[in-house]
Amino acid sequence: MQSVIRWGIIAALSALLAFTAIAVIDPTILGKFYLRSGDVYVFDGVAGPAHDSVIPVPQITHWEEFSSGETSRLAILLTDPDSAWLSLAHGLKSVGIPFVITDDPQRALQHQVVMAYPRISGRVLAAGSLQALGAHVRNGGTLIGVNVLGGGLQKVFGFDDVRATREHTVVRFDPEHALAADFTTPEEREIRIATATHREKTIGAHEYLGTRNPALATYANGAAAVTWREYSGGHAYALGFDPGLLLQKAHGYRLEGVAPAYVNVFEPSLDVILRLIRNFYRRGEPGAVTLQPVPWNKSLSVNVTHDIDYNESLANSVEYARMERELGVTATYFIQTKYVRDWNDEIFFNDRSVDHLNSLSELGMEIASHSVSHSKVFSRFPLGTGRERYPEYVPYVYEERSTYDGTVMGELRVSKFLLDHFSDGEPVVSFRAGYLEYPFSLAQALDATGFAYDSTITANNVLSHLPYRLNHERGGDAQVDVWEFPVTIEDERPPALPDRLDQAIDVARKIARYGGNFVLLIHPNVTGEKLEFQRALISELKSIAWFGSISEFGKWWQARDSVAIDSWLDQRTLRVRVHAPMIISGLTLEIPAGFELVLPQHDAIASVQAERVVLQEFDGQIELVFRKIR
Ligand SMILES: [Zn+2]
């Protein structure tokens, strides 16, 4: 309130000055009445960045970009391009399913496994195409129908009728069904898709009525949410909710509150849906090869991260980094470039502290940005001009809910410039906002200012433990070159950190069952018991997990996202082609059961274990040949 009054006075004064035509007083200087001498730390001779950032305009992503690939892949038969297909595509990439998108039913039906998306009805598919989809399952193919609303295919899927509703908030899986057998925890058996308390956080869903078989999954009222029907070799599944729309909403941080807790617990709702689609695919395509989400065939990826947003933290960081170095772990240090003294805190980014940056770099740690102002209203900042520069850029936190002169571009550009300037390591590419503040413009602003990886959202708010690619404006039609790595465990919520070591380990082990990502956030405001918690957690997970910084894992994940997998099964021989446009090491393939690697027997292969093949560092193309042994 106080700031409103002050601004009112300024506005009145400005108007008065303009009226009296005293043009020499710059209203922006007048606006900085709150600054006292010494409130801005000016490094001698440091100014920048020299270049401007271009304010991003959305580049609409076309589904045709995902249309090439062989018939071994999952075919998405797109029945309405005005749908959440892009988020579905991002989810399929995250879980590692190779796919193509086509709007041509004839082309889709060349694939063994076809997913008709976002709906099947007589309006979106011609009669001949509907008949051909029915014939596909009778001839041994797999058809996954999303929102099967009509078109006469009810009998093919094994139900009589369909009812639209917005009332459902959970989906329950039948643990007796083979395709849901790996959903063993309560959080996997009952997943969350909406909340009843917010209208905008509900999702249009369909109940299938008069089902021939017990449902694979039901809503809370017992109505069928996912149906199944078997043919000789063929399978038909109907989903009553739109997995792409759910992914789009959750990835866009629009389903906050759907999970009962926002952080620190296991919340796999989206991952269960993606794993279900993977189960459909692997069952229906005998040559299915999918990509594991963790490097080097480990069960879990772990990113140890720190937020430096307090004046003692930078010095403490070096102690954390030494311990991490000793344990062979590279961590990420999100550092607030705090050169403005304000309501939040003293200045702690100055000549005395910047030496610590090089200590962290020398210990192999990643230097990343935690913004300039660490404002609680960052998500309401204007985008800015892309011309913000140090030291003129002075975002000032006046009080908890009021910050002057902050912009999204300024927070990103200026913090990156200073961190790049004062550390001699790799360029800064990772960002985390304070207080989980997530402006709508964040993804495109990160892209425009040279960042590629973000770790601001919590895994529980996003209903997933898998990283994913971001879209412009938290929307669904324009992807950007930025990936999100949601925070799993933080250190500030009660109970105190040392009392929840077992809980954190338990969450990690549950995520490890399907190769998810575990991001640990520790504030190095103190050492002592937090340091010991971290040591114990790392030691416990060391044998099952791959550890790396956000940028290390981000680069790997980005490279994995671009990998193309195709296969050809001929009698007893399975040929697999792996194409990696970006260099990647430790890529792990999951191959069908009962095959043995014949070729190549050379240095492209790191190891072969049961149904997993681990590849050495490579880029370009590798061909693998397997022989069926049973
Ligand atoms: Zn912070």
Image (cartoon, rainbow, N blue to C red):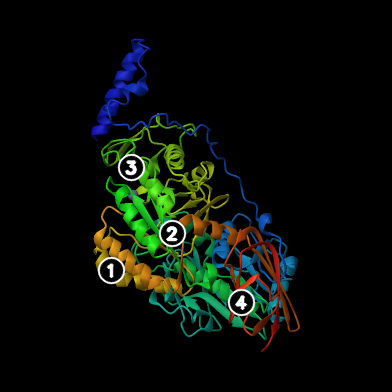
**Kind of residue sitting beneath label 4:** Arg
Mark 2 and mark 1 residues within 8 Å of each other at the beta carbon: no
- In the rendered image, the residue lying farthest to the bottom is 630
Residue to which mark 1 is pinned: 500
Residue 28 in view in this figure: yes
Q: CA distance from mark 1 to mark 4?
A: 37 Å
Q: Which residue is mark 3?
A: 353
**Label 4 CA crowd tier, 10 Å (few <14, some 14–19, many 20+):** many
Name the mark nearer the viewer: 3 or 4: 3
**Cα distance, mark 3 to mark 2?**
21 Å
Image height of 290 relative to 211, above or below: above
As displayed, is residue 607 above or below residue 475? below
Q: Nearer the viewer, residue 327 or 52?
A: 327
Residue 194 location (% of width, % of height): 42, 63
| Image quadrant in which the N terminus is located | top left
> Considering only order in the chain, which callout, 4 or 1, is on the residue closer to the N terminus?
4
Ligand 1 closer than 8 Å to the CB at disc 1? no
Q: CA distance from mark 3 to mark 1?
A: 32 Å
**Which of label 2 and label 1 is nearer to you?**
2
Gap in Å between the C-alphas at discs 3 and 4? 53 Å
Residue occupying the point 26% across, 55% down: 526
Quadrant in which the C terminus is drawn? bottom right
Q: Residues within 10 Å of mark 1 (few under 14, many from 20)?
A: some
Tell me the element at label 3.
loop
Q: Amino acid at mark 2?
A: Thr
For the residues labelled 3 and 2, say whether their Cβ atoms are less than 8 Å apart.
no
> In the image, residue 217 lies at what x, y percent?
48, 77
The numbered disc on residue 330 is 2
